[in-house]
Image (cartoon, rainbow, N blue to C red):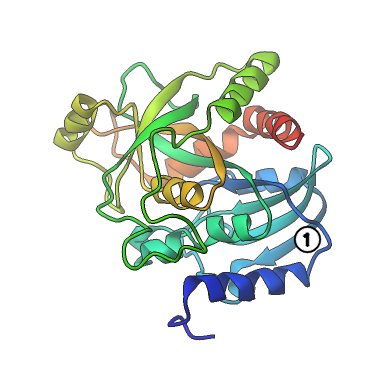
Amino acid sequence: MSRRADLHTRLDYARAWVRGRTEHRPVVGVVLGSGMGALAERIESRVVIPFEEIPEFPATSVPGHDGKLVVGLLSGVPVAVLQGRVHLYEGASSSDVTFGVRLLGWFGVRSLLLTCAAGAVNPALAPGQLVRIADHLNLTGANPLSGPNDDRLGVRFPDMGAPYDARLGELLDACAARLGTALPSGVYAGLAGPSYETPAEVRMLRILGADLVGMSTVLEVIAARHAGIRVAALALVTNLAAGHAVAPIAHDEVLEVGSGARERLGPLLAAWVAEAGR
């Protein structure tokens, strides 16, 4: 199918193809960020589908993003998990960046947990910490809703007064408390990347109210809310932002911290899915 086809048609085509590969009908979705893809191994009765096999689905080219859709059962709940995501800095359009999240909604997901790696803008945060994203700043210069609106996908002017669902956020807090995992909340600034921020940019972000900075998530939240999907988000602090760091920031460091957080992040995701899927 040509990429000139409208988004509604592309999503219908992709959904029909995926439904032909699995009998599971997910109600909860999860997006796994940099270095977190191995958490999908917790899913039972799983069907694993590479992005490149799904019609219309854009591929990812970033190390640490496996580029697979995993459908199965987690905590007894039918789930659809994206191992990795597509980013603006790969040359993708905002429509391609958000295609995976929209497909999850088209597939039946009504509650979504986004995870991401992030740099610490707030000096009170340190690598290895988990932070619940309570709000965001879209500084990417892009919006997935730009252009003609298709009313079948969502309203022209969606309200963003509460982009992150209060109940889903409370469930994250409660699950973290039960597991003895500290979970502060913060504001995430989304930038286009791929270069990391300069010290001056980090100072600007702090003045604007950001606690975290990264290169994903915000466009997915906008698209999900446009589609009527409830959203929660969890950031793993993988590095100190420029100006706070004592050494140059490297992507390998991001992946290493992401991998090291499995023992805390895995149980938290499983507990949250069990609650959100009720």
Q: Which residue is mark 1?
A: 47
Tell me residue 107's x, y (percent): 67, 59
Tell me residue 89's x, y (percent): 33, 59
State the residue in front, 112 or 255. 112
Q: Residue at x 44, y 40 (%)?
A: 253
Above or below residue 166? Residue 35 is: below
Q: Judge the density around disc 1: few (<14), some (14-19), many (≥20) Cα neighbours within 10 Å.
A: some
Q: Secondary structure at mark 1?
A: strand
Which image quadrant is residue 163 in?
top left
Farthest bottom residue in view:
2
**Quadrant placement of the N terminus:** bottom right
Total marks drawn?
1
Q: Residue at x 73, y 62 (%)?
A: 48
Tell me residue 70's x, y (percent): 70, 56
Q: Residue at x 50, y 63 (%)?
A: 99
Instruction: Name the side, left or right, on which 262 lies relative to 48.
Output: left
Q: Residue at x 64, y 34 (%)?
A: 262
Residue 54 in view here: no
State the residue in front, 238 or 156. 156
**Quadrant placement of the C terminus:** top right
Residue 174 in view here: yes
**Residue type (three-letter) at the residue carrying disc 1:** Val
Instruction: Name the side, left or right, on which 151 lies relative to 276.
Output: left
Which image quadrant is residue 199 in?
top left
Above or below residue 259? Residue 193 is: below
